[in-house]
Amino acid sequence: MDLLLVEDKDSFRRLLTQALEGSAWTVRAVADPQEALRALEAAPSHVLVSDLRLPGMSGLELIRRARQLHPTLRVILMSAFAEPRDIVEAMRLGAEDFLPKPFDLEVFLALLDRLRALVGAPPPDPAEPWVAHSTAMQVLDQALRRAAGTDLPVLFLGERGAGKGRCARRLHTLRHPGAPYLTLAAATLGPEGPDPALLQLIQGGSLYLAGLEHLAPEAVAPLVRAIDAAGAGFSWMAGLEAGGVLPTDLAQRLGALELRVPPLRERREDLLALAKALLERSARLEGRPAPWLERPAERQLLDRAWPGNVRELEALLSRTLGQSDGLAIRTFPDLALGCSELLNLPWPEPGSLEAMVRAASRAAETQLLRRALAQAGGDLPRAAEALGLTVRSLAQRLRDQGIPLEDRDSPFPRKAP
């Protein structure tokens, strides 16, 4: 993982760099904040460690501008002279922690270990909509709350797009708020089983295995061994499409508690509230007010059978929001959910031509990946075949583009919070 260190004192910069030699971090160390911003424009980093007092720019201003470039960047601020208001402002700008100089190197390294886990397996957004007005969802919500008081493995059963991954994130938030959370697509597992380095990241957190119906036969035994070896280090969860059958050894380990996720047609009382919550979240991420739904639009939603479940609803709302600039949605012109023939790319941040081309190319790849997955109905192996990739290559591309595996079938890019 990549770390950008910004410290104008040569001796201290060398000390911290040497402390990270041989670690999991690839370190870029600079003395000047402008050089740090140029480095971030050229290539993103996972973590920024910065002094507060820097030549020509404060560490607070550097944090603000750096997170504009990369909103998911995690930040540590350090200083020997910080006032309480500086620390408060740093936290407001998104800093993870503050280290008062001088500090123990062991404390520094332990903090980076925690950030490495959160970078590799970020916890779900606790503000993600959760709507449970219907009887079916209230029953599920009560079951999730009971399960949260245990460490039992949980198997979520439901139709494609019903929200099994969302339920897993909900359970994780109830069990281990703020702890690492990792989704692995079962189709990406091979004869070697889950990567031990990934499993090490999520100690104290949760692992969700998505799409167990796609698990290859040769991956069953290594997965069973990994579950047995991991013990109680973290919580196991998995999703299985309705009608899927697990091998006996795997069912004995992951099926201790089975929870059924109802399809959208069985939770009609949730439909409008869920649509409004999803609209509000998408609009907030775009920095715009959420449009309201007028009666004709509400009737369209209520009259639809939603064969694609919540996944289909979210795709429709995302597309409509992207095409709307008003304060109200009167109708949904296209409920077939076909993808536009044109790429809709955001204008990149001003900079060098090379940097803007890289940003535009990355945005285009994100949309193309999401579109291919949507056309494959969220089926990772089918999408990989259509794109001429292996399943593992596709999964790596999704990770590189910041597309959560549990949301891999949405054809619309999501902006980072």
Image (cartoon, rainbow, N blue to C red):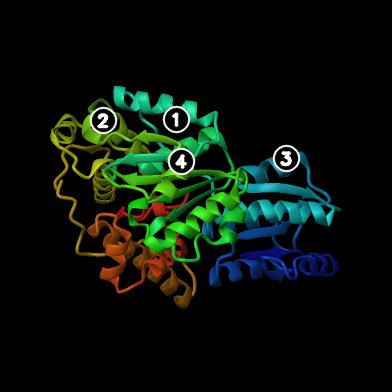
- Disc 4 or disc 1, which is closer to the eye? 1
Residue hosting label 3: 85
| Circle 1 SS class | helix
Residue hosting label 2: 272
Answer yes or no: is residue 74 visible. Answer: no
Question: Marks 2/1: CA distance?
Answer: 23 Å
| Circle 3 SS class | helix
Answer yes or no: is residue 319 visible. Answer: yes
Asked if marks 4 and 1 touch (Cβ < 8 Å), the reply is no
- Lower sequence index among marks 2 and 1: 1
Residue hosting label 4: 169
Which residue is located at x 71 percent, y 58 percent? 50
Closer to the camera in the image, 8 or 265: 265
Name the quadrant containing residue 344. Answer: bottom left
- Lower sequence index among marks 4 and 2: 4
Question: Marks 4/3: CA distance?
Answer: 34 Å
